[in-house]
Image: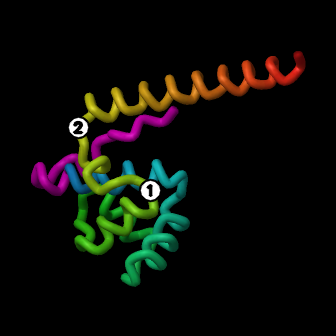
């Protein structure tokens, strides 16, 4: 699984800009989209002229998106905006819970199929 918390490529900038860059990268990865697809979906959701170049600039911390685009990014990713800005430790815990739920779901599915045979 690709980590969702890489640092922006630009490496510099204010702490706030770095957090926004990480949040935008996290949103795109959660959406399972490349820069072009994510830009298209953000354009549709926000109504703003989003391009793949802008997406990369936001993820690299070169510039920051508008509040409208940030909200759209959360919608496209299918999560609350707060999740995009959560700390690494919380995100890891959430990912662990998600994996555990997936495992249990597969187990229950297998058990239900076994019960159907009898």
Q: Main secondary structure of the magenta part?
A: loop
Q: How far, Cα to Cα, is label 1 from label 2?
A: 17 Å
Q: Residue at x 43, y 71 (%)?
A: 42
Q: Residue at x 80, y 19 (%)?
A: 115
Q: Residues within 10 Å of mark 1 (few under 14, many from 20)?
A: many
**81 to 70, vertically: above or below:** above
Mark 1 falls on what kind of element?
helix
Q: Position of residue 19 (x, y in %)?
A: 20, 50
Disc marking residue 77: 1
Q: Which of 105/69 is in front?
A: 105
Q: Position of residue 50 (x, y in %)?
A: 40, 76
Q: Which of 8/67 is in front?
A: 67
Residue 35 shown left or right of residue 62 in the figure: right
Residue 62 shown left or right of residue 1 in the figure: left
Mark 2 falls on what kind of element?
loop
For the magenta stretch, what is the residue range? 1-18
Observer able to see residue 9 = no
Considering only order in the chain, which callout, 2 or 1, is on the residue closer to the N terminus?
Answer: 1
Q: Residue at x 61, y 28 (%)?
A: 105
Residue 89, magenta (yes or no): no
Q: Residues within 10 Å of mark 2 (few under 14, many from 20)?
A: few
Q: Residue furthest toward the front?
A: 118
Q: State which quadrant residue 114 falls in.
A: top right
Q: Position of residue 45 (x, y in %)?
A: 44, 75
Residue 17, magenta (yes or no): yes
Kindly identify which residue carries mark 2: 87
Q: Quadrant of the C terminus?
A: top right
Q: Residue at x 29, y 56 (%)?
A: 81
Q: Position of residue 16 (x, y in %)?
A: 13, 54
């Amino acid at each position: 699984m690709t980590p969702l918390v890489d640092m922006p490529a630009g490496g510099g900038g204010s702490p706030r800009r770095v957090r926004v860059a990480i949040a935008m990268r996290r949103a795109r990865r959660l959406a399972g989209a490349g820069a072009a697809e994510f830009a298209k979906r953000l354009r549709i959701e926000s109504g703003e002229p989003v391009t793949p170049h802008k997406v990369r600039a936001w993820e690299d911390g070169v510039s920051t998106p508008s509040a409208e685009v940030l909200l759209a990014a959360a919608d496209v990713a299918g999560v609350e905006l707060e999740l995009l800005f959560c700390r690494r430790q919380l995100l890891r815990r959430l990912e662990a819970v998600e994996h555990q739920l997936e495992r249990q779901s597969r187990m229950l599915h297998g058990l239900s199929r076994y019960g159907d045979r009898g």
